[in-house]
Each structure stands twice: as structure tokens, then as C-alpha cells.
Amino acid sequence: MPACATTGVACSKPNQKATGDYQQKALQGKWREIDLSGTPWKIAIELFLNSGAKDEVFIAPKHNPRYRVLLDGLWRLRDKGVFEET
């Protein structure tokens, strides 16, 4: 299953995107409590917050050898309520 994210949402369909003001959710800092070891998501969220953008798309590329780890990180972010699936 491909994964896409507007700042961290695992999606069930290719090219599916989540929308909304994710900057406010990211600023709350819940993502800092999540074990995202082996993923780039903490750095990506910090870069997103520093960019001033309202949302961002993160993708776990299916062809990446670490796809499962990347996808699990996105799911942990979603399950913690940092991001919501559409």
C-alpha cells in the first residue's frame, strides 16, 4: 500500500492527499513523544515548521527498502492524532 501524507498521513490509495492546517497540529508537539527511530519524519516535521507552510506532503516510497519502517512511522503519527487520514 502506498503511503502519502500531509505532514504524516498514511493513505490507502495512490496519490491520495490529506488537507487541512497541519502546522497548528505539528506546533502542539505531540509528534515529539512518538518513537520515529529509523525514519526521517522528526527532521521533516521540523523543516516543515520552519518553512512557514500550512501543510506538507510526506511519502513512504514503496520501492524503498525501508518502506515498512517509513510507513509504520506515518501510521504512528496518524494514530497519535498528529495527522488525520482523508
Image: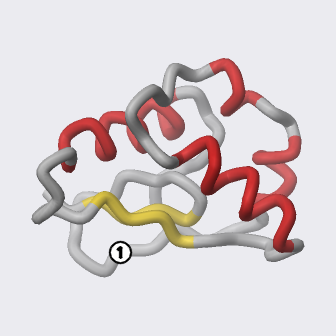
Q: Position of residue 38 (x, y in %)?
A: 39, 33
For the residue pair 84 and 51, the one nearer the viewer reads as 51
Q: Is residue 2 left or right of residue 7?
A: left
For the residue pair 68 and 77, the one nearer the viewer reads as 68
The amino acid type, in three-letter code, at marker 1 is Gln
10 versus 47 height, above or below: above
Q: Position of residue 71 (x, y in %)?
A: 30, 45
For the residue pair 51 and 25, the one nearer the viewer reads as 51
30 versus 39 height, above or below: above
Q: Position of residue 25 (x, y in %)?
A: 78, 46
Image quarter hosting the N terminus: bottom left
The part of the image, by quadrant, that contains residue 59 is bottom left
Q: Position of residue 60 (x, y in %)?
A: 31, 58
Task: In the displayed orientation, state which residue is furthest to the bottom.
Answer: 15
- Secondary structure at numbered mark 1: loop
26 versus 19 height, above or below: above
For the residue pair 74 and 16, the one nearer the viewer reads as 74
Residue at the location (73% across, 63% down)?
48
Residue at the location (73% across, 61% down)?
47
The part of the image, by quadrant, that contains residue 54 is bottom right
Where does label 1 land, which residue? 16
Residue at the location (62% across, 71% down)?
56
60 versus 52 height, above or below: above
Residue at the location (52% across, 52% down)?
8
